Image: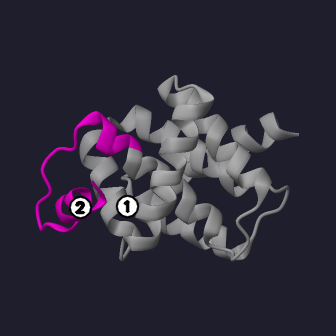
């Protein structure tokens, strides 16, 4: 399964991903962000599970399976560009703003802003075709909800 998805993500012009693959690409991007600072905490795992459950309407077992698959895929994928390109090509702009909010939720889940996570967010937002200002507003909305 991962080999097939990785092959499609790595192709020069990837085909449009079916919904389960797009879900997996988003979940892997959330995991990559959470792992960026070298601390993959229980708070981040919990936040990833909450985001996936809310976004896709999944139950706890389905979420755990999706996150587990994403953890494996994230380890095997060579770079972040593949995930962001797959999401950008499959998800309309308005929904990509929701992706940015989901990423900020994970980045802020442990109660602190790590430099590595901030740097990845500054890289990922434009890769998703989201303006810096929109990413900043998304961060502010998430920060206000988490307080």
CA distance for labels 2 and 1: 15 Å
Where's residue 124, x and y in %? 46, 62
**Which mark is drawn over residue 59?**
none
Mark 2 residue element: helix
Residue 32 vertical position relative to residue 1 in the rendered view, above or below: below
Residue interval drawn in magenta? 1-23
Identify the main secondary structure in magenta: helix
User: Residue drawn at (33%, 48%), measured in percent from left and top?
Assistant: 87
Q: Where is residue 108 in the image (x, y as percent from the top left)?
A: 75, 54
The quarter holding residue 76 reads bottom left
Q: Is 117 situated left or right of 67 in this image?
A: right
Along the viewing direction, whichever of 1 and 116 lies nearer the viewer = 1
- Above or below: residue 94 compared with residue 9: above
Quarter containing the N terminus? bottom left
Residue 5 colored in magenta in the image: yes
Image label count: 2
The residue at 31%/64% (across/down) is: 82
**Coloration of the structure image:** one colour
Instruction: Tell me: 88 left or right of 49.
Output: left
Residue 126 place in picture, x, y as percent: 41, 60
Q: Mark 2 points at which residue?
A: 9
What residue does disc 1 label? 127
Crowd band around label 1 with a 10 angstrom C-alpha radius: few (<14), some (14–19), many (20+): some
Examine the rendering and report whether any part of residue 68 can be seen.
Answer: yes
Residue placed most toward the observer, 13 or 68: 68
Relative placement, left or right, of 117 versus 24 is: right
Residue at 68% across, 74% down? 37
Disc 2 packing (10 Å; few <14; some 14–19; many ≥20): many
């Amino acid at each position: 399964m991962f080999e097939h998805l990785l092959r499609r993500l790595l192709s020069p012009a990837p085909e449009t991903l079916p919904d389960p693959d797009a879900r997996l690409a988003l979940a892997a991007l959330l995991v990559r962000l959470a792992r960026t600072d070298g601390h993959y905490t229980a708070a981040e795992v919990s936040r990833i599970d909450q985001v996936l459950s809310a976004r896709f309407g999944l139950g706890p077992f389905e979420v755990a399976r999706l996150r587990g698959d994403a953890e494996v895929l994230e380890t095997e994928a060579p770079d972040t560009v593949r995930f962001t390109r797959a999401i950008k090509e499959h998800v309309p702009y308005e929904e990509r703003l929701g992706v940015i909010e989901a990423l900020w939720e994970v980045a802020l889940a442990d109660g602190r802003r790590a430099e590595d996570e901030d740097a990845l967010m500054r890289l990922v937002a434009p890769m998703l075709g989201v303006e810096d200002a929109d990413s900043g507003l998304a961060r502010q909305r998430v920060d206000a909800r988490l307080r």
